[in-house]
Image: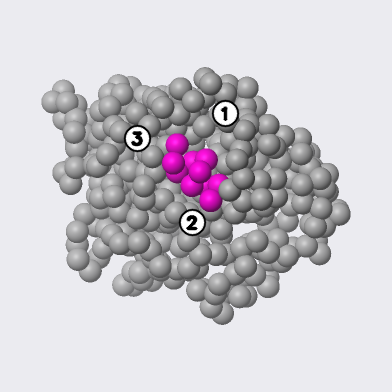
Amino acid sequence: MPPLPAPPRRLRALAVAALCLAALLPAFPAGAATPGPDHDGQDRALEQRLEQLVRAPGGPPGAIAILQSDGHTRVVRAGVADLASGRPPRPGDHMRIASTAKAFSGAVALSLVDRGVLRLDDTLRRRLPQLPAAWGAVTLRQLLNHTSGLPDYSEDPDFIAEVIADPRHHFDSRHLLDYVADQPLLFPPGSRYHYSNSDNIAVALMAEAVTGTPYERLLAELVYRPLGLRDTSLPQGYRLPRPYLHGYDVTVSPPEDVSELISASGAWASGGIVSTPADLTRFIRGYVGGALFGEAVQREQRRWIPGESQPPGPGRNSAGLALFRYETRCGTVLGHTGNTAGYTQLIAATPDGRRSLTFSVTTQINAGRPQQLTLMRAVQEDFVCALLRGRP
């Protein structure tokens, strides 16, 4: 990888702080919790809420949440990681993180902006001239806050047909936008919000273009290594590293294991990353807490506009640059959500990154299942309240 400009001196200190955050989580215990004795009642209430989600009609077979604040960690889980073995979910279990991977592509891009390698007003015309000329005015900022107007390749009939014909089909990740290259923008860039998986594919391609480095290596150099992520990767195939949380389709009976149904190559920078609850905790604390880029970039990231993550997170949602604001009845957290076959994710932290929540369930819950989505968002909000009201 060609050498990149070093981050500012203040940012080096924050990177050290991020490693310290990672050191707080070297290995989660197999047991359920490390709370103080005065939090036993709250712990039981959280466990009961998670059990309610798992036992509800159409609920996930398993769920695990990690709340962390100033070195105090609470692991709450319900159900099982694997219906065959019956073992409980664990913080070190691998899983598909779905669209929370978009925060990782944002971390790469904003780190490059912080170093002066990219600019938020860089256009596709300048950085990716091989893309359709009709898309040329779209900027990096508009890709990151989903106001680009790019048509969503994952909604293209030809792409969908290929996935249906062979879910494990190996796509050329760097040519996913070819599926919609003959289509115009949905609207003038910057004029409205429209969540699109194409946006983060273009972000990754832009990062590759300016650095001459594969996106996977940029992730390793700019995100995994600074934050101490040891169990996070961007695969091309359908296999998951062992051990893993098994993801299920619960709309059939008995539930079908879909953990390794789909090739990650068809999601790539928009949703292909595999990680663990423990690593996602490290990531969201560092990403929101300022460990990867400085205050000037962070201010730009937090210019909020109306827009929901997919699926919607708890409370009222608004969109920034590869980050969403979730305003709940108890206060505000920043993060991202995601859903894919077998998995639904929420990662969030307080604006200073000192308190964090990761919330993972082992089935896909989105707007197509409104009752389950309503219940899940209510449970997530209860967990956010527990996080904000005091030490987990």
Which quadrant of the figure has residue 22?
top left
Precedes in sequence: disc 3 or disc 2:
3
Q: Residues within 10 Å of mark 3 (few under 14, many from 20)?
A: many
Which residue does the image show at 24% across and 57% down from the upper left? 80
Asked whether, in this view, residue 260 is left or right of residue 205, the answer is left
Q: CA distance from mark 3 to mark 2?
A: 20 Å
Asked whether, in this view, residue 175 is left or right of residue 73, the answer is right
Instruction: Give the label on residue 234, or none.
Output: 2
Q: CA distance from mark 1 to mark 2?
A: 24 Å
> Mark 1: which amino acid?
Pro
Span of residues in magenta:
217-226
Instruction: Give the label on residue 226, or none.
Output: none
Predominant secondary structure, magenta span: helix
Q: Residues within 10 Å of mark 1 (few under 14, many from 20)?
A: some
Precedes in sequence: disc 1 or disc 3:
1
Depicted 242 relative to depicted 229: above or below: below
Observer able to see residue 320: no
> Mark 3: which amino acid?
Ala
Residue 210, image x, y percentages:
70, 45
Depicted 297 relative to depicted 341: above or below: above
> Mark 2: which amino acid?
Leu
Secondary element at image label 3: helix
Residue 357, image x, y percentages:
37, 36
Which quadrant of the figure has residue 111?
top right
Q: Which residue is mark 1?
A: 7
Q: Which residue is mark 3?
A: 22
Observer-side mark, 1 or 3, equals: 1
